[in-house]
Image (tube, rainbow, N blue to C red):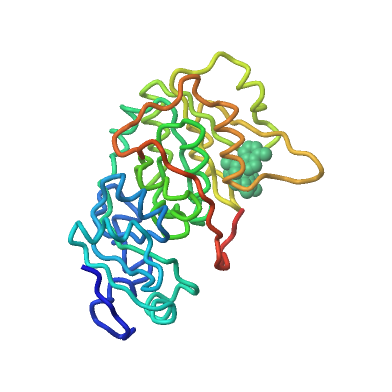
């Protein structure tokens, strides 16, 4: 049922007033066992969440031009509230609101052990705390055929609004797991036969082109570090290789997401990713949406 609303103080709209912290509980952000909510903005991301099998809680749409996907939510007995732009902007605090935003229950995440067992190409991130960078890394990894992502406890949430927008919703279906200290994941991966390439611009690293020229490892992980500090000494020590992308022009490093694109391309799997549990379905149309708000944290 589409429910017209014109009062921004309407208590039924409470869920749309929550910020990132209010939507995701602490385990969602830091450990493996989250069960909170996430916010999908725009019809593309809402479509992708539905296709990934996520359960919608409520939607808020433009009463003048509700997108077609609103009808699907309506037929699933999800409350679809409809109102004007000003009312929706006041409720959400999101500036110019998308024609649809919807709140979903989070899908279950795989465990680190589950991902290590099922995947052959993994991206690991340590202390990448900007959701824009995490969204970019997910999009690069998914688009270049990698199997999943492991994050440490301080990295940003792949289902945060800005991460979802940058990844074009890919993060909903891209398997990702968390653990507190990334060095433990590196040790698990190496014990399971993975070659682990820690990406660092340090001069003593192996040139990425030389690693890419070797016969491809059957099981391979790349590790991306923090925007300012790079990777921790523990992760660098636990990895198989330190790997550098040679820089020129006096530039000391790439942005974390850009480095992930270069490495995921150079070390891409010969055979594209088979769908792991929780991965997105085929036929998604990539339509870029603008990142329309200031990024207040470092983009590395
Ligand atoms: C902005 S960089 C961090 C720079 C930091 N000063 C350092 O020394 O690592 C963010 C991450 O992207 C990756 N990265 C960026 N440029 C790189 C390069 N030229 N070679 C290898 N990795 C790079 C690394 O994983 C790095 O931790």
Image position, residue 112 (x, y; %) = 32, 37
Q: In the picture shown, does residue 212 fall above or below 125? A: above
For residue 208, which quarter of the picture?
top right
User: Residue placed at 42% from the left, 27% from the top?
Assistant: 273
Taking the image as four quarters, which one is ligand 1 found in? top right
Pinpoint residue 7: horizontal percent, then vertical percent. 31, 86
Q: From this viewpoint, is residue 201 visible? A: no
Identify which residue is drawn at 35% across, 69% down: 61
Asked whether 274 or 233 is in front, the reply is 274
Q: Looking at the picture, does residue 188 appear above or below residue 24? A: above
Camera-nearest residue between 101 and 74 = 74
The residue furthest top is 215
Task: Please state which of residues 58 and 5 is positioned toward the viewer in this rendering.
Answer: 5
| x and y percentages locating residue 57 in the rendered image | 23, 62
For residue 218, what is the image quadrant?
A: top left
Residue at 57 percent of width and 45 percent of height: 257
At 53% from the left and 41% from the top, the residue drawn is 224
Left or right of 2? Residue 211 is right
On the picture, is 269 further left or further right than 105? right
The reply to whether residue 187 is in sight is: yes
Residue 101 image position (x, y, % from top left): 37, 64
* Location of residue 76 with respect to 183 vertically, above or below: below
């Amino acid at each position: 049922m589409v429910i017209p609303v014109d009062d921004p103080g309407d208590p039924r709209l409470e869920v749309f007033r929550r910020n990132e912290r209010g939507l995701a509980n602490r385990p969602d952000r830091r450990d493996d066992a989250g069960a909170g909510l996430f916010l999908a903005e725009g019809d593309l991301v809402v479509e992708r969440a539905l296709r990934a099998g996520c359960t919608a809680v409520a939607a808020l749409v433009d009463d003048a031009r509700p997108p077609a996907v609103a009808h699907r939510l309506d037929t699933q007995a999800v409350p679809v509230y409809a109102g004007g732009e000003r009312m929706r902007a006041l409720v959400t605090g999101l500036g110019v609101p998308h024609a649809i935003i919807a709140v979903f229950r989070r899908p279950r995440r795989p465990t680190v052990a589950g991902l290590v067992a099922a995947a052959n190409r993994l991206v690991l991130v340590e202390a990448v705390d900007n959701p824009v960078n995490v969204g970019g890394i997910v999009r690069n990894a998914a688009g270049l055929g990698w199997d999943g992502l492991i994050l440490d406890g301080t990295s940003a949430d792949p289902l945060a609004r800005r991460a979802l927008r940058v990844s074009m919703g890919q993060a909903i279906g891209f398997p990702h797991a968390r653990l507190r200290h990334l060095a433990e994941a590196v040790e698990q991966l190496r014990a399971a036969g993975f070659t682990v390439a820690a990406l660092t611009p340090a001069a003593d690293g192996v040139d990425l082109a030389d690693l890419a020229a070797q016969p491809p490892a059957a099981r391979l992980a790349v590790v991306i570090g923090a925007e300012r500090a790079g990777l921790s000494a523990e992760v660098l020590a636990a990895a198989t290789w330190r790997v550098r992308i040679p820089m020129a022009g006096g530039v000391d490093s790439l942005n974390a997401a850009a480095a992930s694109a270069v490495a995921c391309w150079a070390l891409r799997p010969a055979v594209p990713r088979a769908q792991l549990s929780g991965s997105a379905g085929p036929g998604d149309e990539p339509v870029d949406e603008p990142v329309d708000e200031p990024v207040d944290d470092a983009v590395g």
